[in-house]
Every structure is written in structure tokens, then in C-alpha cells.
Amino acid sequence: MISAKLGHFLDKPLAPLAKRIPVSPNFLTITGFLITAAAAVVIPFNLIGGGILIIAGGFFDMLDGVVARTNGKNTKFGALLDSTLDRYSDSFIFIAIAWYFFDRNNLAGVMLSIGSLVGALVISYVRARAEGIGIECAVGLMERPERVVILAFGCITGWLFPVIVLLFFLSHITAVQRILHVYKMTKYNHNL
């Protein structure tokens, strides 16, 4: 939703910074992933610290794309690496949140965290599969930028349980939105 509405709106304001960054977009992607992995290690013990690390990892995740587009360094491998490490990052964060709830004997929080992880992975899968058959599918309420912002907010404020409830429902609603989008795009052409 944020991506669809705002697109690459930060490209222009960040272009001067992006042009001065001497490292490759893939280096930034890996750095963002490592910061997010660190967030996952921290979350079960320190929610605020974990939330701050989620934001830092998200910044690098956004910056890699700006650097790639601004400096003409977009590559198919870079796109694959970014998407793959995003899935690992999402998985690590949701597992860490499940661990946080497990330590506090909150079984509902554990189950909702696992369910939210499934939803996040299905959202990504539906888009990848749709694009594999030639249909653009960046639709829905809960894309990755929204997840990152909401998860960081939940960690920093301590409102993690309401946030994970929200993410659970919105993730699965988004997966259904994407499936319906692909159905509409193919309804005159599908073979059922």
C-alpha cells in the first residue's frame, strides 16, 4: 500500500546521498539483513532495542533500492537477493516475537506470530507467482514497508500483542486481496 501509493518518492530527495555511497546496493541489502537479524536476537530480551534495530534495518532495506536506481545499478540478481533476504528478515522477526510471547506464557501471541509469519510469506509468494505469469501484483493493505513500520511501533511502544493481532488479520486479508486481483486480471483468460 505504501509502495503502491508513494512508489519511489524518496529517490529524488535521497539522490545526492545515494550518489556518494561508495558501496554496492547488494552490500546495503546484506547490511540491512544483518541489522534485522540482530533485531531478532534482541527482541525477546529488549523490545525497545529490537524495535530500533528493525527501523535501522528497514532504512538500509529502503536505501539499497534508492542507490541501485539512482546509480543505475539495478540487477536481476540484486532484486532476487533483496527479496530473498526480506523473507529471511520477516521470518527471523516473527520467530523472535513468538519467542518473546512464549517466554511470557502468552500462547495466543505465539500462535498469532506464527500465523502472521505464514501470512507474510504467502503475500510474498502470491506476488512472485503472479509476476511469474506476467501479472503485476503490488496490491493490498499490508505490504512489507507497512509490516516493518507496524512491528517497530509495536516493539517500541510495548503494544506488541495488539500489533500482532492486527498483523495477523491484515496479512491474510492482503493475501486474499492479491489472489482476487490475479483472478480478476485472468478471469477472461483462465483455464479452470
Image: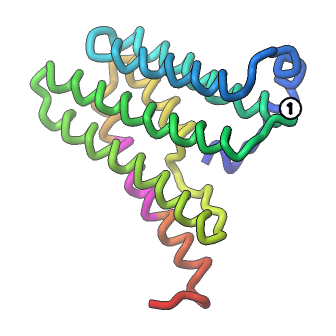
In the rendered image, residue 122 lying in the magenta stretch gets the answer no
With 158 as the anchor, is 128 left or right in this view? right
Secondary structure that dominates the magenta span: helix
Is 158 on the left-hand or right-hand side of 185?
left
Q: Position of residue 144 (x, y in %)?
A: 53, 40
In percent of width and height, residue 47 lies at 34, 14
> Which residue shows up at 62% across the image and 56% down it?
138
Q: Which residue bears the numbered disc 1?
A: 70
Q: Quadrant of residue 116?
A: top left
Mark 1: amino acid: Thr
The residue at 60%/37% (across/down) is 82
User: Which residue is drawn at the image coordinates 33% and 48% (left, top)?
Assistant: 118
Task: Find out whether residue 167 is within the magenta segment.
Answer: yes
Q: What stretch is highlighted in magenta?
A: 166-176
Dot 1 lies on which element? helix
Instruction: For label 1, count other residues whose C-alpha is less than 10 Å away and answer few (under 14), some (14-19) or many (20+).
Output: some
- The answer to whether residue 104 is above or below residue 82 is above
